[in-house]
Amino acid sequence: MSDSLPTLPGADLASHMASVATAGLRDVADRLHTALQEVWPHDALVIFTKECTGRPRKKAGDPLITGGVTISELDALRDGASPGLWTGQAVLGGLTRPVALLGAGTGALLVLCGPRDPVVADGPAHTRALWDVAAACIAHLVAEARPDYLRESRAATQERLEVTAELTDRHSTDLESLLAVLRGRNLDDATARARAIDLAADALIRTRTGGDLVVSIAEEPVVTAFERLRSDLSPLSRYQSLQIQFVEPPSDGRALPGEVAHAARAIVRSTVLLMREQEEVTRVRVQWNCDGTNLLVSVRDDGPGRLNRELPAVRQLVARAASLGGLLDLEAIDNWGSRVEVRLPLDASQPLEQLPGSWGLRPREIEVLRLLTAGQRNRQIAARMGISENTVKFHTSRIYRKLGVTSRAAAATVAAEAGLR
């Protein structure tokens, strides 16, 4: 690199870092791309991180390049990348192109496609600094599991559909190649069979690898998710006088969608910190369970029982659960302790208004039915909706009549069968 290249002023680097550090998940790639153009010009930029389950690819730059980048290509690049900066030729967007790769301690990968000569003497070092900020920012936003991120992550099924489409296309190509060999007349039977076996074996390996990749992006084993939570909370019990008891979920429990795992950890972390702020709390019990349909989270303390739903921190927890169609219930008893119970559905539910046969329910009746289906009692529904128990009874009677049932259990069954969670 020429010594005559200028050095990026410290103020400019600080400005770029501030821009990247304050980015959201939707615009972090664009901001990083803009900042790096003044340091290390390139045609396109791609970020790949399995932590962000909704959209593991974040792209900026030339759409003719970014539009063709596949998850499988990025996964192969990350597996083959060295720990530091790597430059060379690699397949990206279906073509072999010059690239520069940078990993991160979070496991994320940065790909610069078509990198040109740095325009500042310490371009690679500045690139590393900006990328470290971006990677840390992404990891923080995912771990924080804000309601807007959780809603977007659950709704962003297109990314997973694209991965499935990639695998389908590849599988179709493999089958066509296999059929071409079997139908060919230029090979004898033994040669054709040997070649067909080789093609089928390679295709099977690629299909299984691709399937594992889709699952690893979309889901997290429930035991693994719980171990990460235990690791997150270990400093509280290690360096402070707070005993945290963990009740692990069944080892054979259903894997959690990524956004559910992120939300559950964030809710538990925030709940434990909130409980710790009360006087006289010495013990917190954290339990996860899975009934096959929902992740069930319970957090209890032995404190004075003074938590309430009106606290801003508690409202934030309720919003996190609600963003995934879940429910959070808080019960606090003076001098006995506080209990937070959370139910997070593992599958995205279809809004009742969009389901066939919504029975002409009004919005308030739909919400009552949704809470009733989740197992909430009249008192809990009244507290959640800010209405009286008599009003809840009035709504449930109208719901029974419209659904043609005579009991809570029957109403919940009808709603659940229709897809309401």
Image: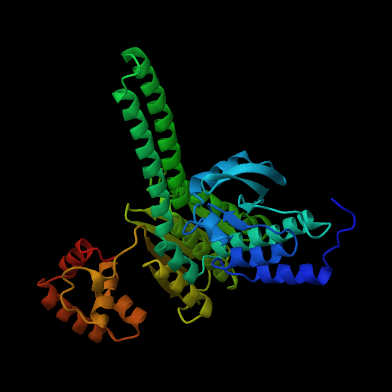
Report the residue at 86% width, 59% height from top: 5
Report the residue at 36% width, 67% height from top: 325
Foreground pick, 365 / 87: 87
Foreground pick, 165 / 378: 165
Left or right of residue 178, residue 114 in this image: right
Q: Position of residue 405 (x, y in %)?
A: 11, 71
Report the residue at 37% width, 31% height from top: 177
Q: Position of residue 350 (x, y in %)?
A: 29, 66
Foreground pick, 146 / 157: 157
Left or right of residue 67, residue 124 in this image: right
Furthest residue to the front? 186
Relative to residue 411, is residue 98 depicted above or below? above
Report the residue at 42% width, 62% height from top: 156
Name the image quarter holding residue 123.
Answer: bottom right
Examine the rendering and report whether any part of residue 336 can be seen: no
Q: Position of residue 16 (x, y in %)?
A: 72, 69
The C terminus: image quadrant: bottom left
Foreground pick, 283 / 158: 158
Relative to residue 379, is residue 62 depicted above or below? above
Q: Position of residue 184 (x, y in %)?
A: 32, 23
Furthest residue to the right? 3
